[in-house]
Image: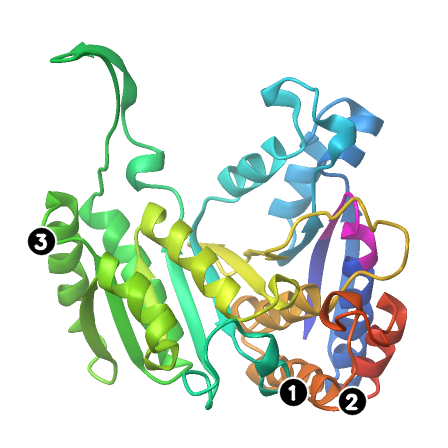
Amino acid sequence: MNKHIALLRGDGIGPEIVDSAVLVLKKIAEKYGHSFQFTPYLIGGSAIDETGAPLPEETVKGCLSSDSVLLGAVGGPKWDTLPGNLRPEKALLGIRAAMELYTNLRPAKLYPALRDDCPLRPDIVANGFDILIVRELTGGIYFGERGIRQGKYGEEAYDTECYSVMEIERIARAAFDAAMLRRKQVISIDKANVLESSRLWRKVVHRVAEEYPEVTCTDMLVDNAAMQLVKNPAQFDVIVTSNMFGDILSDEASQVTGSIGMLPSASLGATKRGLYEPIHGSAPDIAGKGIANPIATILSGALMLRYAFGMEREALEMERAVDAVLASGARTADLSHGGASLSTEEMTQRILSQI
């Protein structure tokens, strides 16, 4: 299978970790008889330095003409004083909009080898957990009507939560499709006891669930979900929820894994193209030192194989390689607690040796 992958290496540690993921993807392609072509494009601060804009038109065109997109990270103190519309982070919103991405997939997995790094009690995480949060990305309160007005008590601010049936249907289908590749369980998280938007959300999700008889679908209120994520995270398989609830819960879930440097993500739209990236930032303080953890970006590459290309076998191979290396005791500096650690290149080579 021949695939063209756009590379957005970005800023800070972005180039280093994307290069690591490319090496692993090339090894997978070689082993399974695929051909991956990689084309780099500018984004973020590096794009500002070279073109004056955080998201050049060439980058947008390149991403739209590719089969998928792998992103490192953007931003850094060098560009913090720029106007908001010229900041590196503006490029992330721009590329997501250009690619019409409305689904955000955020896995939160506790690796057995990293159980001691989890902040939860050992008895709670004895069997680990593997959660996939499916967050609606382009609707809800972040995109609703907002403003400042005079109210009962003087000046007040307001933001509006609004969801259409279409928006809920498409994110629900994305969640159920993902569940079909996993343990076939979906928990829909809302606030239907208070919010009208959540009542519509629940109604539509239940209707979509009827299209997936193999998948078990249950509801959970968001306040209870926040508690259950720390009380019994293993009960979750796929979570589907709104933009704001997903924003909050995915950050909570990432912290109970013990290391944000391990977590990949995917942003998807109506096509299978998608944008794949680690959830961590550009870490400018360690850029160029060769000590960044490449695992989240490598695992983002695995998500790309699974969701963009339908290569489940190959994705599992990458994930199992990471599992094996961690089980051997290999750690980058962010996971070593001051002990012996591997460089970015050394960790990458260890993972390659398992493929």
Position of residue 226 in the picture relative to residue 26 (left or right): left
How far apart marks 3 and 1 lie (CA) works out to 42 Å
| Tag nearer the camera, 3 or 2 | 3
User: Any magenta on residue 218?
Assistant: no
Give the residue number, with chain letter if any, for mark 2.
Answer: 354
Q: Which amino acid, by three-letter code, is at mark 1?
A: Arg
Residue 312's place in the image compared with 7, above or below, is below
- Asked if the residue under mark 2 is in contact with the one under mark 1, i.e. CB atoms within 8 Å, the reply is yes
Three-letter amino acid code of the residue under disc 2: Gln
The residue pinned by badge 3 equals: 193
Name which quarter of the figure residue 349 lies in.
bottom right
Q: Where in the figure is residue 152, as x and y percent of width and height?
A: 11, 13
User: What residue range appears in magenta?
Assistant: 7-16
Which of discs 3 and 1 lies nearer the camera? The answer is: 3
Find residue 296 and report its image quarter: bottom right
Q: CA distance from mark 1 to mark 2?
A: 8 Å
